[in-house]
Amino acid sequence: MCLRRISNNYYNQYKIYFVSNGIDYIDNSNFLVSGSHDEINQLFTINNSVDSINLYIIEKLWDSHVGYTNSISTNNVAVLRDYIFNSTTPHEIGHALGLYHTHEDSNKVKLDGSDCSISGDLICDTPPDPGLNEENVVNCKYVGDSRYNPLVDNLMSYSPCRTKLTNGQVWRIRQTIKNNEVIRKTLNTTHELNFINWKFDKSSSVCLNQSKTFILENIPTDCFVTWKVSDNITIKTSNNSSVEINLNNLNFESYLKAILLIDSRFYTFYLRLNQLEHPLESNLTLESFKSTPIYLGRFTNITARYNSIIDVGQLGYTWEWSVPSSQVIYHSPNYSYIHVSPIGTPSSLYIQVKASNECGCTNWKGKWFKVEPAPDDCIDCPTKGGEIHY
Ligand SMILES: [Zn+2]
């Protein structure tokens, strides 16, 4: 709706976004005019929502005020109806998000070169501002006291040309959003949830009888985390953002869940765990194409199997080979076969292989293969030259 758009028009350029959390109507004309701090603070107790910045639209405030916040860093803002669509609303939102006026009283101290981080608006890239108005800002040019060189476009001034924030102001807003208890609660939680993600070493695999730590990143600071695991896993240690688990046996399904309690709602983050074992050479076998010898002048396929299975990437192993004096064609390191063509005329070749994964590595597994000339009438056997016969 329009109010959201008004603030977004000013703030989106700094990657700060507002979403509407609904509109209420307060059916009581007594609150149209607030004649004092007490009266406006009473209004701020009505239909107030802690998970939003509450913008109250009224008709009149005391003196000539056109907007009001009950403090710096607050979720309560009031703006006069006639000013709601100009820079007053984003200016008041600036106060709500932790910004002082650029002409904040002691700001003049900045002229003495005193520490800008503890005087004035507490921001170092806003120059001293004597207090801007329609007399000392003409056609968006400052024409007042020449000791000053204020920003006439700064949203937190009283300049008629205010539209912008400085980097320092944007930084202070981000600090407020991050650290202020009241403002943190107004964050759009579903948006915040997008930043939570799993972090782990190498992959989401776990090794049998080995421990591994999983971290959930970007959890909101005031959020409580409960960890849950499948039956075959035990939790060794945990805190509010990480968990160390041990895989005790292989199961149909292994998982890790983090259940987050945010603003009295539960959110579950599920991680399916790939189960791995330390590979053993006793499970490895080696064979040649159709159990033929390795033929001279041809590329013969040598295949390793793990538990009788040829790995074409699905088992997750990395395969390493040791082949004496031969031309060798390797494929993916995750594939368990190679093509071998002997150099010279050896009578046999001792070929070795080993498999490794995140859990560890087998010892070398070797096998002797006979080497022979290919039969003249060899049709269904490894082909000549570079052509590969599977
Ligand atoms: Zn103000």
Image: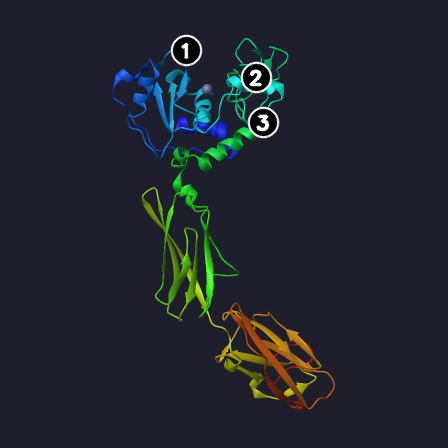
Q: Which image quarter: residue 365?
A: bottom right
For residue 221, above or below residue 8: below
Q: Between disc 2 and disc 3, whose residue precedes?
A: 2
Q: Nearer the viewer, residue 286 or 106?
A: 106
Left or right relative to 222: residue 378: right
Please state which amino acid type lies under the numbered disc 2. Lys
On the image, the x and y values in percent for residue 179 come to 45, 36
Q: Which residue appears at 41% of the width and 59% of the height?
A: 237
- Distance of label 1 from label 3 (alpha carbons): 30 Å
Amino acid type, callout 1 = Ser
Q: Earlier in the sequence, mark 1 or mark 2?
A: 1
Number of the label disc, if any, that sits on residue 108 = 2
Q: State how far apart marks 1 and 2 are (Cα).
A: 24 Å
Viewer-nearest residue: 256 or 286: 256
Q: Secondary structure at mark 3?
A: loop
Cα distance between the residues tagged 2 and 3 = 13 Å
Choose top left, top right, bottom left or bottom right for residue 208.
bottom left
- Residue labelled with disc 1: 64
Is any part of residue 343 visible from this angle?
yes
- Judge from the rendering whether residue 240 lies leftward or rightward of residue 373; answer left or right: left
User: Is 297 left or right of 304, judged from the image as shown?
Assistant: right
Q: Residues within 10 Å of mark 2 (few under 14, many from 20)?
A: many
Count of residue discs: 3
Can residue 13 be seen from the camera position used here?
Answer: no
Disc 2 on helix, strand or loop? helix
Residue farthest toward the left in the current orientation of the protein:
27
Q: Position of residue 86 (x, y in %)?
A: 45, 19
Rendered location of residue 163, percent (x, y)? 52, 23
Task: Judge by depth and name the residue closer to the eye, 286 or 34.
Answer: 34
Q: Residues within 10 Å of mark 1 (few under 14, many from 20)?
A: few
The residue under label 3 is: 124
